[in-house]
Image (cartoon, helix red, strand yellow):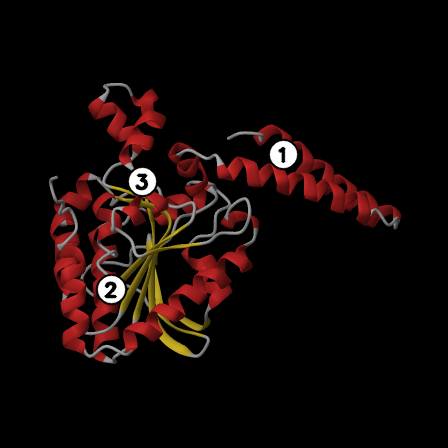
Amino acid sequence: MKFSNEILDLENKISELKNFSKEKKIDLSSEVEKLSRERDELLKISYAEMTDWDRVSIARHPERPYTLDYIENMTEDFVELHGDRLCKDDAAIVGGLCKIDGQKVMIVGHQKGRTIEENIFRNFGMASPEGYRKALRLFKMAERFSIPIVNLIDTAGAYPGLEAEKHGQGEAIARNLMEMAGLKVPIVSVVIGEGGSGGALALGVADKVYMMENAVYSVISPEGCAAILYKDSSKASEAANNLKISATSLQSLGIIDGIVKEPLGGAHRDYKCAANDLKSVILSSLLELSKLDVDTLLKNRYNKFRKMGSFLER
């Protein structure tokens, strides 16, 4: 990304000045403010000229807020629910009941880890069939009690291991797609980081689908696409730009309904601000969807996905 080294240097200087000011009890606020303005200007220029490959890097940023971070910053009274009632509890999918500004919702999402231990526990956010069956169990519970559903998507893809295939990975994803198409409650899905292939789609059949500004959503990773099409995974940046995986590209194609703005520099720079912007979009969408009767809700959802991929020749 353009000016990345300069931005990092400025941030280090800002941090040093703040620490020095605190230790020596000297007012350096004017100097900090000046450097902050310089940094923000460079960020604006950098983010205005980003490529889709740059956005992939931001979507994968290790400090980017994950599902549990958003739950912590925008919900109240969250009660996590575990297990698929068939085999086990998959930690790559988290979900439960909560309130968003008093609005009851069932929230479900992929969860990655930050440390090696967390990533092993969460399987890097790549869910097994048990995870998608847990999600479906929570969806059905929400439908039973007429509670709207909010899904937060953030995965490189469903887990491709032998055990997952033995346990019916394809069937679990396909069943989620089928069942979500007919759930009689409003569904809002948001790609908060990576939206990879069927692993993302299994939580993506919704009345409203949004993406965070720096999220990506694609049938395959840029590296995988480059390895298949170009026989060279080092051409991932070229593949990313051709895949049209950014929020702006997908909105123009009618794949998503809108883009959730992120704080300057990305959601990882201000969790609270990112969560507030996301909360606002979710609540406004749920209010809009709550005005529809069930038949209209289901008809609109069907038509939304049915028309994708339709083009007129001129």
Considering only vertical position in the picture, is 310 above or below 97?
A: above
> What residue is disc 2 on?
207
Q: Residues within 10 Å of mark 2 (few under 14, many from 20)?
A: many
For image coordinates 88% across by 48% down, the residue present is: 26
| Res. 245 mark | 3
Q: Nearer the viewer, residue 299 or 181?
A: 299
Residue 158: % across, % down: 24, 45
CB under 8 Å between discs 1 and 2: no
Q: Nearer the viewer, mark 1 or mark 2?
A: 2
Q: Nearer the viewer, mark 3 or mark 1?
A: 3
Q: Quadrant of the C terminus?
A: top left
Residue 78: % across, % down: 42, 71
Q: Marks 2 and 3, how far apart in space?
A: 20 Å
CB under 8 Å between discs 3 and 1: no
Q: Marks 3 and 1, how far apart in space?
A: 27 Å
* Amino acid type of the residue that numbered disc 3 sits on in the rendered structure: Ile
